[in-house]
Image (cartoon, grey):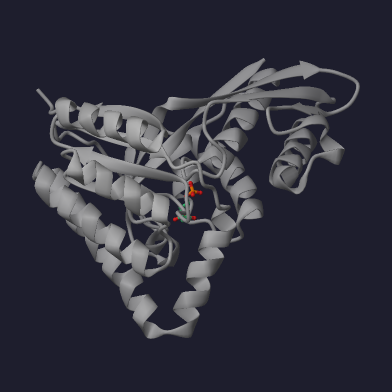
Amino acid sequence: MEGTAHGKIILIGEHSVVYGHPAIAIPFNDSRIVCRLKPSETDVIVSSLYEGPLSDAPPLFQPIRKLIGKLKAAFEHGPCHYIIESDIPIGAGLGSSAAIAAAITSAVYKMNDRPLDSRTHYEWVQYSETLAHRNPSGIDALCVTSDHGWFFTKNKREPIEITISGSLVIAYSGETTPTSQSVAHVRKLTETSEDFQQIINGLGGLAFQAKDALVSKDINALGDAMNAAMEGLNALGLSTERIERLNHLAKRHGAIASKLTGGGMGGCVIALCASEKDAENVRDAWTKEENVRTWKINFREEA
Ligand code: PMV
């Protein structure tokens, strides 16, 4: 039995979304996770990071262990091999932990021949995410369990479609920091000075600007909001030298905007481009000069 899930990309609003501000995120269908279940004598995890008994899995797997325990209790099903294949880099801001939880949940529901509605799916993933980093906004859980974008706040979610023509190029910096760590870092800053709270508020305002830009199909205004958000994220200490280099390189090769996505302190960078040609130029530059893994998403204007 098999469950699949995809990653997600936050266009704008990471971190400030934890404080009740909006964020915009889209599913990342080119990046997927598959979980296959095979009934066996004991629970075993088979993955690129760890292979062995579920009970001995390293701390990183703790949320998954608890999720599986809760799912097993709910369905009273026996032990299994949980075979996880992922092409989403771990800790890269693309929602890998949420996607793993989503794929496992989906596989368990299928094995038990039970329908899984999106609300229930979200709840299971959010349960696992809460174990991974205490106070998740829910944007990852929502995005990996749905097939369209969201304008999201903790209290309200509106589906959003990107109908601007243009492209988004994504690069994995190769650096990773657990989201729990970057979220704790920002929390500490906001507790030490009001200036940091102002930055968070500013990021919230920029997410509204980005939404307006999407509605009015103004790619330059979207880019302005994303660039300004990067400045805010940098001021919160979430950038790295590599991220700065990737941002700089993207803009030098035609990107309208370039920023980190997700928790930051490494992870992925996204570059917004007005044309596929610009996007290819950015991709080439990132590959040749920084030797990073890249992806590309093309947005289409509605007919
Ligand atoms: O790094 P990721 O993919 O886990 O994204 C986290 C997004 C944050 O806003 C930093 C945290 C959250 O709970 O929304």
Residue 279 screen position, x and y as percent: 22, 31
Between 166 and 115, the one nearer to me in the picture? 166
Residue 301 screen position, x and y as percent: 13, 28
Q: In which image quadrant can residue 204 be found?
A: bottom left
Instruction: Look at the image and tell me whether residue 40 can be seen.
Output: yes
- 252 relative to 42 in the view: left or right: left
Vertical placement of residue 10 versus 36, above or below: below
Residue 212 screen position, x and y as percent: 15, 52
- 215 relative to 80 in the view: left or right: left
Vertical placement of residue 37 versus 60, above or below: above
How many numbered dots are placed on residues in this image? 0
User: Which residue appears at 60% of the width and 34% of the height?
Assistant: 100
User: Which residue appears at 81% of the width and 17% of the height?
Assistant: 39
Q: In which image quadrant can residue 162 be found?
A: top left
- 254 relative to 259 in the view: left or right: left
Between 94 and 23, the one nearer to me in the picture? 94
Which residue, as the protein is rendered here, is positioned at the far front?
Answer: 289
The C terminus is located in which quarter?
top left
Which residue, as the protein is rendered here, is positioned at the far right?
Answer: 41
Between 75 and 140, the one nearer to me in the picture? 140
Which residue, as the protein is rendered here, is positioned at the far bottom?
Answer: 193
User: Which residue appears at 48% of the width and 51% of the height?
Assistant: 138
